[in-house]
Image: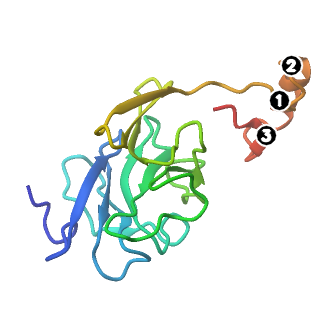
């Protein structure tokens, strides 16, 4: 179903749509001109779920690169954006990866905040193969994704484990709680427990 000229661009591929948990944002991949790479991630929003979608906006050079970004998915709280670099048809993968296509994640502090620089999910999730199409379970405890390999396109799941050793001393103790209390509500990387 076409969503109209605010979302769909004539003659170019718009695909892999993902509606935010609130129903107020729609993320998708597009090969339309004017982007930063082969394909970019765009978002359109609306004031209420009864309204039409507004004009699609490119997420910009913090999220998008000169390569291909594809398959956006939001976490249940809307604060994490998962996507893949998608080096199809001979285009190279995004630098800093582990294989043909990797899964990346960007975060934002709150729903109205800008997306931060994406990070690669690393070799425990990404392989030398084509890893893509990640999404997080409703309870936030599992990441689901697919890998294209010579044996087909199997789906995988990876547990999302909490890391509460905030000072990296090998123990979870009162020092970690003190660190958490001192930095509560701050953007402090050592207290990212997910």
What whole-number distance in Å separates the C-alpha atoms at marks 2 and 1?
Answer: 17 Å
Is the C-beta separation of discs 3 and 2 under 8 Å?
no
Residue 1, numbered circle: none
Is the C-beta separation of discs 1 and 3 under 8 Å?
no
Sequence-earlier tag: 2 or 1: 2
Pinpoint residue 105: horizontal percent, then vertical percent: 53, 49
Residue 147 drawn above or below residue 175: below
Indicate left or right for 78 with 189 as reference: left
Looking at this rendering, what residue extends furthest in the left direction? 1
Q: Quadrant of residue 121?
A: top right
**Secondary element type, mark 3:** helix
Residue at x 14%, y 76% (from the top left corner): 10
Q: Quadrant of residue 137?
A: top left
Sequence-earlier tag: 3 or 2: 2
* Residue holding disc 2: 171
* Residue holding disc 1: 181
Residue at x 37%, y 73% (from the top left corner): 38
* Residue holding disc 3: 190
**Secondary element type, mark 2:** loop
Residue 151 drawn above or below residue 114: above
Residue at x 38%, y 77% (from the top left corner): 35
Residue at x 55%, y 60% (from the top left corner): 114
Indicate left or right for 78 with 54 as reference: right
How crowded is the residue under tag 2: few (<14 C-alpha within 10 Å), some, or many (20+)?
few
């Amino acid at each position: 179903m076409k969503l109209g000229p605010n979302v769909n661009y004539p003659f170019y591929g718009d695909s892999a749509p993902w509606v935010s948990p609130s129903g107020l944002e729609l993320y998708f991949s597009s090969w339309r001109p004017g982007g930063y790479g082969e394909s970019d991630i765009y978002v359109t929003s609306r004031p209420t779920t009864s309204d039409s979608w507004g004009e699609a906006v490119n997420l910009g050079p913090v999220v998008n690169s000169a390569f291909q970004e594809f398959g956006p998915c939001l976490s249940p709280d809307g604060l994490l954006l998962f996507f893949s670099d998608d080096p199809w048809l001979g285009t190279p993968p995004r630098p800093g990866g582990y294989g043909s296509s990797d899964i990346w994640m960007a975060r934002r502090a709150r729903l109205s905040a800008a997306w931060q620089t994406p990070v690669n999910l690393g070799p425990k999730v990404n392989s030398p193969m084509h890893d893509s199409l990640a999404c997080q379970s409703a309870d936030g405890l599992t990441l689901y994704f697919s890998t294209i390999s010579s044996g087909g396109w199997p789906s995988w799941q990876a547990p999302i484990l909490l890391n509460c050793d905030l000072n990296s001393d090998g123990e979870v103790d009162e020092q970690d709680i003190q660190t958490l209390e001192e930095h509560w509500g701050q953007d402090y990387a050592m207290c990212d427990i997910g």
